[in-house]
Amino acid sequence: METKKFLEILDILSQNIQDDTPSSILKNSFKRTPYTILMATLLSLRTKDENTARVVSKLFIIANTPQSMLQIPIEELQEIVKPTGMYRKKAQILQDVSQVLIDRFDSQVPSNKKDLLSIKNIGEKTANIVLNNAFNIPIIAVDTHVHRIPNLLGFIDTQNEKDTQKELSKKIPKEYWSIVNFNIVSFGQTICKTRNPLCNICPISNFCRKNPFTN
Ligand code: SF4
C-alpha cells in the first residue's frame, strides 16, 4: 500500500473517532500535565484503557505531583491502582519513578528521550507516548494496535514494534506522526478489534485486504 492511501485512511479514521472510545475516555479522565501523563502511561501497561481511566480519575485527585504520590502509604496506593492489574509492582513503580523525578529532575518530567530512558521502569514505548502527549514532540508511539493494523493493511511488513516504529516513521510524513497513535488505537479498540473485528461497519473496509465482505 502506498503512503498516499494510508494517509487517506488516517483521515477517514480521524473523522470516525467516537467520544466514547476507551482511549478518548482515558484522555478525558484526568487533568493532563507531563507528570499525570507519565503516571497514567505507566499504569496503562498491560491493561485496558477503561481500567486505567477508572483508576486515574480517583488517583490524581489525591496525588498529581511526585511529592503527593510519595505521601500515599504503599498499601493504600496498591489498593487504588488494583483495577489496572499487577498492582503491587505498579504502585512501587509510581513511587520509584516519582522519587527519581524529585532527586534528579527537580520534580519535573524530562522532555527528552535520553533522560526519560535513564529512569528505571521507563521504556521506549512509555517515553514515546510521554514525549508525544505531554510535550507535543512529533513521534509515532507504537503499541499492539499500531503494530498490528498497518501490517494487516499491507502498509508495512514488520515482525516487532520496534521495527514498526522505524518503518512508520520512514513512510509517514512528520506532520502526521502525532495523530497516528490516537487514531489507530481508537480504531483498534472499537472496530478493528484483535479477535472480532467489526468488518461490517468498518469505515476503511474498501482498503482492507482482510475484509471478508469484499474477498
Ligand atoms: S475490514 Fe475488518 S479487518 Fe479490515 S481494517 Fe476493517 S475491521 Fe479491520
Image: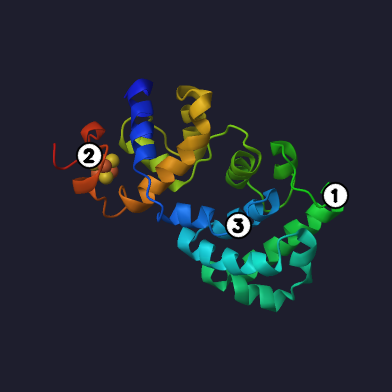
Residue 106: mark in rendering: 1
Q: Is mark 2 within 8 Å of ligand 1?
A: yes
| Labels 1 and 3: the sequence-earlier one | 3
Q: Position of residue 74 (x, y in %)?
A: 72, 74
Q: Nearer the viewer, residue 165 or 19?
A: 19
Q: Which residue is mark 3?
A: 40
What amino acid is labelled 3 in the image? Ala
How many angstroms separate mark 3 from mark 2 (CA)?
34 Å
Q: Please tell me whether mark 1 sits on a helix, a strand or a loop.
A: loop
Name the image quarter holding the C terminus.
Answer: top left
| Labels 3 and 2: the sequence-earlier one | 3
Rate crowding at label 3 as few (under 14), some (14 to 19) or many (20 or more) other CA atoms within 10 Å: many
Q: Is mark 1 within 8 Å of ligand 1?
A: no
Residue 18 can be seen, yes or no: yes
**Residue 115 horizontal side relative to residue 18, left or right:** right
What amino acid is labelled 2 in the image? Lys
Q: Which residue is mark 2?
A: 210
**Residue 102 horizontal side relative to residue 34, left or right:** right
What amino acid is labelled 1 in the image? Asp
Q: Nearer the viewer, residue 173 or 103?
A: 173
